[in-house]
Image (cartoon, coloured by chain):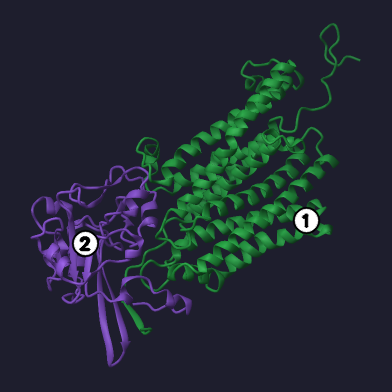
Amino acid sequence: MASQTKRYAMVIDLRKCVGCNACTVSCKIENQVPEGVFRTWVKEIEKGTYPQITRFRLPRLCNHCDNAPCLAACPVQATYRAEDGTIMVDYDHCIGCKYCMAACPYDARFINPIRKTAEKCTFCYHRVKAGLLPACVTTCVGGARIFGDLNDPQSLVAKLVANNPVQVLKPDMSTKPMVFYIGADQDIMGARYGDLEKGERKHG
Amino acid sequence: MDNVTYLANVTHPVQLGVLIAIYFFYTGLSAGSFVLSSLGTVFGIEKYKPIAKAGVIMAIALLAIAPLHLIADLEQPGRFYTLFFRLNPTSAISYGTFLLTLYPLNSIIYLWFLMRKDFAAGANQVSGFRQKLYRFLTFGKTDLSPEAVAKDAKRAKLLGTLGVPLALLVHGYTGFILANIQARALWHTGLMPLIFLMSAMVSGTGLLILVLLLSQRFFSPERSITPERKKLILDIAQLMLWFIVVDASLMVIDFIVLYYTNAAGRAAAELFLYGSHRTMFLGVEAGLGLFVPFLLLLIPRTKGSLSWISLASFLTLVGVIAMRVNFVIGGQQLPLTGNTLNPYTADPRHLMFIAVFALAELAILYFAFRFLPVFGLPKTPPAPVNYQGQVGAK
């Protein structure tokens, strides 16, 4: 977003992701995310038939969209955009109507069963304010997650987005996500409706 | 590549559940009965005037209960009042907050102007509790001169004229609540507000017919469904036939286009036409809720019978409840990520709320039709009073 001096974004280089879920765990600890719900998680699929088979992983989190449907949906302005572009939830004002959860095309939101408000990834706003990186970024063993200011052309995220073929999830929703993937496979990026039509229920 | 196996993903249960679906059902009933009420008072169709009061009482009684479902569904119900001052102009819910407030207020004032002359006359005619109630409800305006009555009718027409767009907006906005969500393929269509409005008309007419039958039989001064009343009910039933035709046409159009939208839209259509939602959609919503009532209202033998028409009306209610559940919950069951339907389990507390609210609704309707002069005052004048002030001395 051009009007902002900072625009934090994340690049996830899937060539370096090993699917260890260290990000999932560190996020849970850092943000005290209750059992059963996730601010970040790693989706994993297996594609093909042995021996022609590959595993693909897709770490998921809030996309902090430039054109965020949750921001438009919230009836009490509890969802807001911080000065650095991060989409935040004001837990003191959220009424828990869950309309934002219906509006999010990425299933990024959940109801915190303890706090009873909507919740999601905040790009570890509290850490970033203190000059640290988000917990998932610092813990990523392969260095697959890169975080930084997209408005700063010298930042690593800006360079990676400029110099690599990157994808975002569901670009057709015109949400302009701020999480970019390098090397994402199309079969893992959205829903697989073909499986539904056949009535198959493949569980991981 | 077809051979894809999911190894890990997070499940995302359906969030807006049965409370929201039933809320849509109530607002639909309210809007539908209000529009029927306005046919006589606003659009000046003389034959519908006898149902004007019944329609608007239903509209108010239903809208008194409807928002409770929304509050019960909140995770933080104690914060609901912040909806009134922390507005978001891009959220349909923000508009709904004010529509849900203005519409019942307008309806109550409208009802008062419709009923004031009955209250004023009743305060002198009836006795006991009702007399006190009617006297209180006149709020001191007991003028029964033709000018005052004509003025009431004029004001009622003005408020009714205001009420019709409000009723349509109240129910139209619920359509927008779903239609504005681009992420959900089943919801994201411009037809959604219209589909909601037409199913509101269908169910509103259905409930109005049932309420009219029961209340005229048991609470009207005549305690019976007179031939004129029967004629009017049969007439309203034929209106319902046309509402069903339009509602079903909109649904067919919606599904045809849904098939040609995108992968998610096609999956939504197939889920309803071939998949696990088939019974609820084709069987209950379309079959029991639209097709059977359509036949009952079309066949000459059944369309003239009050019992068959009651059955048709009841079935439209079942069908529209199914429609609300199908669209609200089914729309969210279609996955946004992954390859399985999002699970939904109704919270037992929510089901309990629905039952309590339904009982409260029945109680309100019962008391309103029992004690208010919906169908006029008793025709028999009070016993003559003789010179000594002794009642009924003969």
Q: Position of residue B164 (x, y in %)?
A: 60, 38
Q: Nearer the viewer, mark 2 or mark 1?
A: 1
Residue B16: quadrant of the picture: bottom left
Determine which quarter of the picture holds residue B336: bottom left
Q: Which chain is green?
A: B
Local crowd size for mark 1, using a 10 Å CA cut-off: few (<14), some (14–19), many (≥20): some
The answer to whether residue B144 shows anywhere in this view is: no
Q: Nearer the viewer, residue A117 or B172?
A: B172
Determine the chain carrying the residue at label 2.
A
- Residue tagged 2: A28
Sort mark 2 into few (<14), some (14-19) or many (20+) by Cα contacts within 10 Å: many
Who's purple, chain-wise?
A
Element marked by disc 2: helix
Amino acid, disc 1: Trp
Q: Chain of mark 1?
A: B
Vertical placement of residue B282 versus A57, above or below: above
User: Residue drawn at (32%, 68%), measured in percent from left and top?
Assistant: B10
Q: On screen, A196 above or below A139?
A: below
Between residue A54 and residue B226, name the one nearer to us: A54
